[in-house]
Amino acid sequence: MTNPTFGVTIVKTAAAWGAVASMALCVAVLIASEFMPVSLLTPIARDLGMSEGQAGQAISISGLFAVLTSLFIAGFTRKIDRKFVLSSFSLMPIVSGLVVSSAPNYTALMVGRALLGVAIGGFWSMSTAVVMRLLPESAVPEGLAMLNAGNAIAATISAPLGSFLGDYIGWPGAFFFVVPLALIALIGQWTNMPSLPPRNRRATGNVFRLLARGQVALGMTAILLLFMGQFALFTYLRPFLESAAGFSVSGLPLVLLLMGLAGVAGTWCISRLLVTRLYSIVIAIPLVMAAIALTLIVVGSELPVAALLIAWGFFGTAAPVGWGTWLSRVLHDDAEAGGGGLQVAVIQFAITIGAATGGLLFDWAGWWSSFPFAAALLLGSSVAAWAASFEWEHSKSNGDPPRSRRGS
């Protein structure tokens, strides 16, 4: 049985879903690899002879290379078969895991993490467009949901899994753990994905043109500040939990797992409200997160800290879902450019700057300094989201709503 897809490709249904499933597994590997250092900063710093702030740059460097890749990859690969390009990016987490797990020093660690950043930026930038060519139009939302499921599962388990594996097989073993999974994803992808020759389309090469729209500029500013604030705090949770909140090493995986499970619950609950309360939600979530960040500074016992972090996971994991919905409404006419390039660049840049600045503050003044910094950024995200809401309503009242409101 065959189904016509977006563009010129016709793919057997079973093979197409097998390719999408392998892409979802690759997404899970990428996200798990990206955020695993969050729960392993202390042993990495100890074994490689660096500060915990320096170890946190393992997240910053991957974010930096993801930004650069997402901005420029379309121009470099426009004449290459998409199957080959995507498989190349799927190979990189394998190489990265091998390099990081055997890293003898700081430089080798950063090289491995840079390779991971290239894979993240390139894979995410192309994933939506590839799914649109693999599946018939009616099945594309389900295919994208499968990719996001891999993202959510990995985000939920990466930190507690890293902490658990780090305690039993060491942090190098934790990073090597993802290599076989990445290899399975690569084999499945290469086996099931058909040839996807590049389309005869002329790329603009400039995703920043979208920022000329006021609604897009405000929304991307809110996304930037949201992820900066989130990772200025989240990256350095383990040192905070150990030194300030008094959590034992064995208690860390449980707290991180509860945060992840709360995130899954928050995503499910809040997604039900996005159809009618989109802007209210994207305004309120960073406000709540800012309040949690400030409250953590003055709360020192384990139980209240755990409760606050569970709330952080509930709201923080749901926030990207809200902005993903916003993107589908405002940039539906530029879905590939907005979703595949600009948003990836903004998010990864925010993670890079947030984690890097949080690390500098952590080393300079201690764990507490990154928490008010995160709260200020999250408050700014809420203000930018309110401005985007105001601009949207103003445009509607003038009879000229922002381009492409389909899906709202």
Image (cartoon, helix red, strand yellow):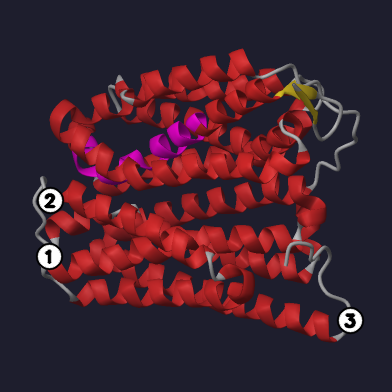
The residue that label 1 is drawn on is: 302
SS class, disc 2: loop
Q: Look at discs 3 and 1 and give the one toward the viewer.
A: 3
**Residue 200, quarter of the rendered image:** top right
Magenta segment? 25-45
Residue 300 location, x and y as percent?
13, 71
Residue 293 location, x and y as percent?
32, 71
Residue drawn 67% across and 75% down?
388
Amino acid at pointer 1: Glu
Q: Earlier in the sequence, mark 1 or mark 2?
A: 2
Q: Is residue 284 left or right of residue 243?
A: right
Q: Is residue 387 left or right of residue 256?
A: right
Amino acid at pointer 2: Gly
Q: Is residue 228 visible?
A: no
Name the chief secondary structure element in magenta: helix
SS class, disc 1: helix
Q: Are marks 1 and 2 in contact (CB under 8 Å)?
A: yes
Residue drawn 44% across and 77% down?
287
Q: Is residue 33 magenta-colored?
A: yes
**Residue 127, quarter of the rendered image:** top right
Residues under labels 3 and 2: Cα distance? 56 Å
The residue that label 2 is drawn on is: 251
* Placement of 187 over or under 268, stated as above or below: above
Residue density around tag 1, few if under 14, some if 14–19, many if 20 or more, within 10 Å: some
The residue that label 3 is drawn on is: 399
Residue drawn 60% across and 72% down?
278
Residue 350 location, x and y as percent?
52, 55
